[in-house]
Amino acid sequence: MRLEDEIKQKKFKNEFQKAAVNLIYTTNWLEAKFAPLMREFGLTVQQFNILRILRGQHPTPATINLLKERMLDKMSDASRLVDRLLEKGYLSRQVCGKDRRRVDILITQAGLDLLEKIDVHEQKFYSELINLTSEEADLLNNLLDKFRG
């Protein structure tokens, strides 16, 4: 469906404004579609993002600052998200032996196992939701990278 129909706006100042609005709208649309899948696994989208970052780091630990740098949603409170995931047993936290001020965060086997279960559903989710060919998705990725400069 066209953006104009979705947001009931007939005119934009120019194509650049429309592109920016379209990106914001599409980001929110995609997150709204993705959130129920995460809820099935007892996670928020932001918690899932933390787990994915830590899986990518595994077995190297991460700090809260590293998580903040890599998070998709820069407005999320990484410390609070880590605390919630610790409570669920998906992360472990330990004081760094070399620098006692630094706290290392690691994904646990339970966290890795959960992500493995999610992977199957996530792939199906994207293949059903995203109405693009692989080539179109590649083009979109290149255009978005160019958009950000």
Image (spheres, rainbow, N blue to C red):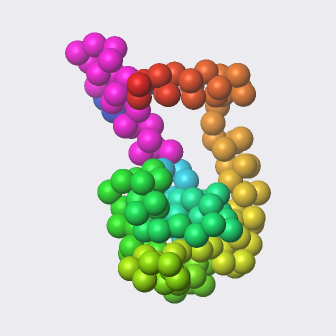
Establish if 10 lies above or below 95.
above
Q: Name which residue lies at 28% across and 13% down.
A: 14
Q: How many labels does the image show?
A: 0
Q: Is residue 86 left or right of residue 60?
A: left
Residue at the limit of the structure toward the front, as seen here: 98
Residue at image point 47% right, 22% down? 146
Q: Please say if 135 is above or below 73.
A: above
Residue 49 covered by magenta stretch: no
The residue nearer to you, when weighing 108 against 88, is 108
> In x, y percent, where is residue 106?
59, 74
Asked which quadrant contains residue 100, the reply is: bottom left
Give the x, y percent position of residue 134.
Answer: 72, 28
The answer to whether residue 39 is seen in the rendering is: no
- Measured as percent of width and height from the top left, residue 12 is found at 26, 18
Residue ranking furthest to the left? 13
Q: Is residue 103 left or right of residue 20?
A: right
Per the picture, the main secondary structure of the magenta-coloured stretch is helix
**Magenta stretch containing residue 20, yes or no?**
yes
Q: Nearer the viewer, residue 25 or 66?
A: 66
Q: What stretch is highlighted in magenta?
A: 9-30
The image position of residue 143, as x and y in percent, is 51, 22
Q: Quadrant of residue 130?
A: top right
Q: Which is more toward the observer, 124 or 9?
A: 124
Left or right: where does residue 63 sit relative to residue 122?
A: left
Q: Residue at x 43, y 68 (%)?
A: 64
Task: Give above or below for 75 relative to 101.
Answer: above
Whether residue 73 is visible to the viewer of this picture, yes or no, is yes
Q: Residue at x 74, y 72 (%)?
A: 113
Quadrant that contains the C terminus: top left
